[in-house]
Amino acid sequence: MRVDRKSVKVVVAGGFGTGKTTLVGSVSEIPPLVTEEVLTHASIGVDDLTGVEDKSSTTVALDFGRITISNDVVLYLFGTPGQDRFWFIWDELAQGAVGAIVLVDTRRLGTSFPAVDYFERRGIPFVAAVNRFFGECPYTEEEIRAALELDETVPLLWCDARDRASSKQALIELVRHALSRLPATA
């Protein structure tokens, strides 16, 4: 029996150092394509390493992975670069996407504002996923929603980008949210 597979494009976005490459790598069933380059002295004063001082590389184009959700649905994951000098790539990566996961680092909340704004302005469904880098998040859902000025219809969840099951759950929540926004068919 032949199964017609549906391809679904998903964007994994967020600020510099929020865990996009890690999430794509943790959940991809294929070795992920990554375009990581070593941070050099040229990035001093350009890339803000506050809170991520040990970061030694960064995505310069995209990350790509794939995960089969069911017999007939395959998600293609496109991770964005986090620095604003690479944002011109976002329009290409977001084109045709069913939605996005915006990773949030509560130690550096300001890095998430541009990604939230990007998807809101374009009407692309997204979920905000607080990446628990060091265990529990010290903020409540209400505090994070208020800080990010998230609309109440945008799902907010917690994840650990290093953990496959947690990353997969974030993807499932995104797909559910995107499907709920589709117009009802007669």
Image (tube, rainbow, N blue to C red):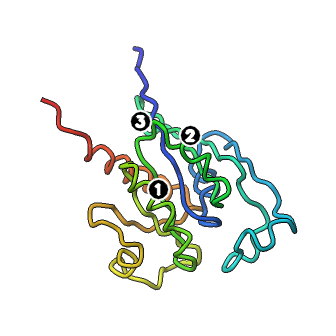
Residue underneath mark 1: 118
> In this rendering, is residue 141 above or below 99?
below
Decide which of tag 3 and tag 2 comes sooner along the chain: 3
Which amino acid type corresponds to the residue marked 3 in the rendered image? Answer: Ser
Residue 15 image point, x, y percent: 58, 64
Q: Which quadrant of the rendered structure holds the C terminus? A: top left
Q: Classify the position of the N terminus by image quarter.
A: top left
Q: Horizontally, is 76 left or right of 5 in the view?
A: right
Which residue was labeled with disc 2?
Answer: 92
Label 2 is placed on what type of residue? Glu
What residue type is disc 1 on?
Tyr
Name the spot of residue 53 as percent of width and height, x first.
74, 77
Closer to the camera, 141 or 160?
Answer: 141
- Helix, strand or loop under label 2: helix
Residue that extends furthest to the top in the rendered view of this protein: 1
What's the distance in space between the residues labelled 3 and 2, CA to CA?
27 Å
Q: Secondary structure at mark 3?
A: strand
Q: Nearer the viewer, mark 1 or mark 3?
A: 1
Q: Position of residue 27 (x, y in %)?
A: 56, 50
